Image: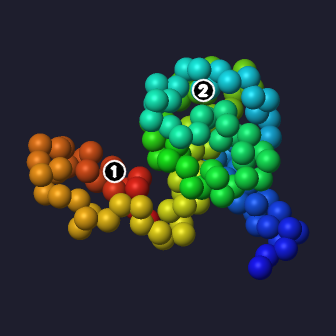
Amino acid sequence: MRTRVSLKKLNDEVIAKIEEISGQQVRKCFQCGKCTAGCPSIDSMDIMPNQIMKLIQMGETDAVLNSKTVWVCDSCFTCESRCPKGLDIAKVMEAVRQVLLRTNVDKVKPEDIEKETFDGLPQAGIISCFKKFTG
């Protein structure tokens, strides 16, 4: 069983990795909520974008890494255009996805998807999906 100190260290390492990959300082977010208010994908998210930022700030990385929000983010950059601090939350979401992908745990297995699902879909969309959802 991990001690509190080692859990904090692990969370700090995840936060540092997210900041390194994204180039964003997540601690600058002051929870104004403008990112969430303008997000076109909000209806499909389980945790709002501003809440993702708060969870990262608080070191609650497990909740962030297990949320579907990071996979639902369209990376449309609406959040960046609205943020008074100039934070690019889409880059943070992509960094979280990268942290997850680097663990090599597949979220979607191609062999589990029915053939009918692929009918009529553009190949570029299918490849993009698997790049985003698999390790």
The answer to whether residue 81 of the structure is visible from this angle is no
Residue 3 in the image, given as x and y percentages of width and height: 85, 74
Taking depth in this image into account, of 68 and 93 the one nearest to the observer is 68
Which residue bears the numbered disc 2?
36
Residue 76 in the image, given as x and y percentages of width and height: 47, 30
**Against 49, is 12 above or below?**
below
- Which type of secondary structure does the marked residue at label 2 adopt? helix
What's the amino acid at mark 2?
Answer: Thr
What's the amino acid at mark 1?
Answer: Cys
Residue plotted at (74% across, 40% down): 54
- Which type of secondary structure does the marked residue at label 1 adopt? helix
Taking depth in this image into account, of 52 and 104 the one nearest to the observer is 52
Residue plotted at (59% across, 20% down): 37
Q: Quadrant of the N terminus?
A: bottom right
Which residue bears the numbered disc 1?
129
Crowding near pointer 1: few (<14 within 10 Å), some, many (20+)?
few
Residue that sits furthest to the bottom in the current view? 1
